[in-house]
Image: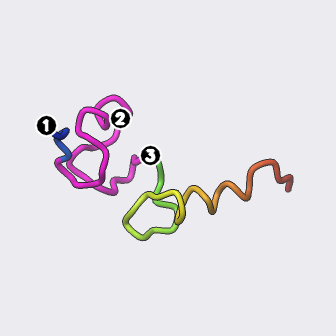
Amino acid sequence: MPTAVDSDGDTWSDAAEAVIGTNPSSACGLDSWPPDINNDGLVDIIGDITRMAGLFAQHC
């Protein structure tokens, strides 16, 4: 089975990045989504999404 092209190696295929509007040539561009919240060069559930999940439903 052929694999999808991922020019920047960020685990998002170039086709997916075209749909979501990120740069397929930049693994961590300024317009990226999802964000690299902990700035470790990776977007992952443990390092990024879990950190934000604890903030949902909190009030200032």
Report the mark closest to the observer, 1 or 2.
1
Residue at 29 percent of width and 54 percent of height: 10
Along the polypeptide, which appears first: circle 2 or circle 3? Answer: 2
Query: Which mark identifies residue 2?
Result: 1
| Image spot of residue 39 (x, y percent) | 45, 68
If the image is split into quadrants, where does the N terminus sit? Answer: top left
Residue placed under numbered mark 2 in the picture: 21
Residue placed under numbered mark 3 in the picture: 33
If the image is split into quadrants, where does the C terminus sit? Answer: bottom right
| Image spot of residue 7 (x, y percent) | 17, 48
Corner quadrant of residue 4: top left
Mark-to-mark CA distance, 1 and 2? 24 Å
For the residues bearing labels 2 and 3, Cβ distance under 8 angstroms = yes
Question: Between residues 5 and 35, which one lies in front from this camera angle?
Answer: 5
Element carrying mark 3: loop
Q: Is residue 33 left or right of residue 11?
A: right
Q: Is residue 8 above or below residue 1?
A: below
